[in-house]
Image (tube, rainbow, N blue to C red):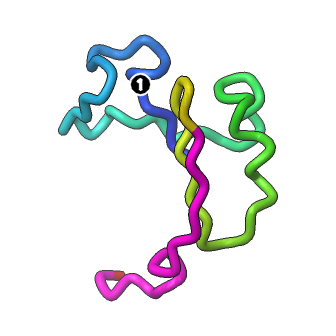
Amino acid sequence: MRQNRALRGGSSGPGEISADPDYFVPLHVSHLEEWCPEMVPYLGLPPGWRVLLAPGHEDVWYDESLLEPDPGL
């Protein structure tokens, strides 16, 4: 999981995505309960599922394209 710096007091405001390569912070699952406890219930979803959580918004959907091999690798 990658944590958006804006959610943790970064420089970009809500809805703004920065081109800075350090905009997203790698986050080990062992720190998830501290950084983003609302995501913990979704950890059991099988591969191919996406989750988008925002204040007042929850969206969970299946995206088959996540299971396709990346031709660039």
Left or right of residue 42: residue 48: left
The quadrant in which residue 47 appears is bottom right
x%, y% of residue 33?
77, 29
Amino acid found under the numbered disc labelled 1: Arg
Residue 52 inside the magenta-drawn segment: no
Q: Is residue 11 above or below residue 3?
A: above
Q: Magenta segment, which residues? A: 58-72
Q: Is residue 21 above or below residue 61?
A: above
x%, y% of residue 5?
41, 25
Question: Depth check: 65 or 70 in front?
Answer: 65
Identify the residue shown where x is 74% and y is 50%.
42
The quadrant in which residue 62 appears is bottom right
Disc 1 target residue: 5
Identify the residue shown where x is 80% and y is 44%.
41
x%, y% of residue 35?
65, 25
Q: Is residue 42 above or below residue 30?
A: below
Question: Depth check: 58 or 71 in front?
Answer: 58
Dividing the image into 4 quarters, which one contains the C terminus? bottom left
Residue extending farthest to the front is 56
Describe the element under mark 1 as helix, strand or loop: helix
Q: Is residue 52 above or below residue 8?
A: below
